[in-house]
Image: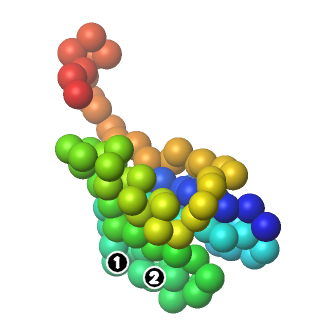
Amino acid sequence: MKNIVITGASRGIGAELAAILSTNNKVLLLARNSEGLKTLQDQFPSLIIAPFDLADADLKKNLTAIINAHFNRVDVLINNAGTIVNKPVLDVTR
């Protein structure tokens, strides 16, 4: 059994990976969309959900607390969260 964290897990690729990996693994799903996470957990009760925005100003502290509440280690991180930025790369800011 692996401890897996998936970001951007409320829909699309993240949700599909969660469904596939929920068997025989402990899977923590992170996403801004709490309703999407809850829907997944209703379908796959073994999933652990945590609504979370990776743009959180205290990302390191808050994300560490969430992960430590469920796991003593992380075996796999699937960093699937993303956003669309429609401008030249040199114009992108934090």
Total numbered labels placed on residues in the image:
2
Q: In this view, does 30 lie to the left or right of 14?
A: left
Query: Mark 1 sits on what residue?
Result: 35
Residue 35, picture quadrant: bottom left
Q: Which residue lies furthest to the top in this view?
A: 90
On residue 1, the disc is none
Residue 80 sits above or below residue 35 on the image: above
Q: Is residue 12 left or right of residue 55?
A: right
Helix, strand or loop for disc 1: helix
Q: Nearer the viewer, residue 70 or 34?
A: 70
Q: Which amino acid does label 2 sit on?
A: Thr
Q: Are marks 1 and 2 in contact (CB under 8 Å)?
A: yes
Residue 33, picture quadrant: bottom left
Q: What residue type is labelled 1?
A: Glu
Q: Is residue 17 visible?
A: no
Q: Which of 56 and 79 is in front in this view?
A: 56
Helix, strand or loop for disc 2: helix
Give the Cα distance between marks 1 and 2.
Answer: 6 Å
Going 31% across and 16% down the picture, which residue do you hit? 89
Going 42% across and 53% down the picture, which residue do you hit? 64
Task: Residue 51 in the image: state x and y as whole percent.
Answer: 35, 67
Going 20% across and 44% down the picture, which residue do you hit? 57
Work out which quarter of the rendered image holds the N terminus and state it.
Answer: bottom right
Going 62% across and 82% down the picture, which residue do you hit? 46
Circle 2 packing at 10 Å, graded few (<14), some (14-19), many (20+), is few
Query: Mark 2 sits on what residue?
Result: 39
* Way the structure is coloured: rainbow
Q: Nearer the viewer, residue 18 or 3?
A: 3
Work out which quarter of the rendered image holds the C terminus and state it.
Answer: top left
Q: Which of 62 and 52 is in front in this view?
A: 62
Task: Residue 75 in the image: state x and y as whole percent.
Answer: 69, 52
Q: Is residue 26 visible?
A: yes
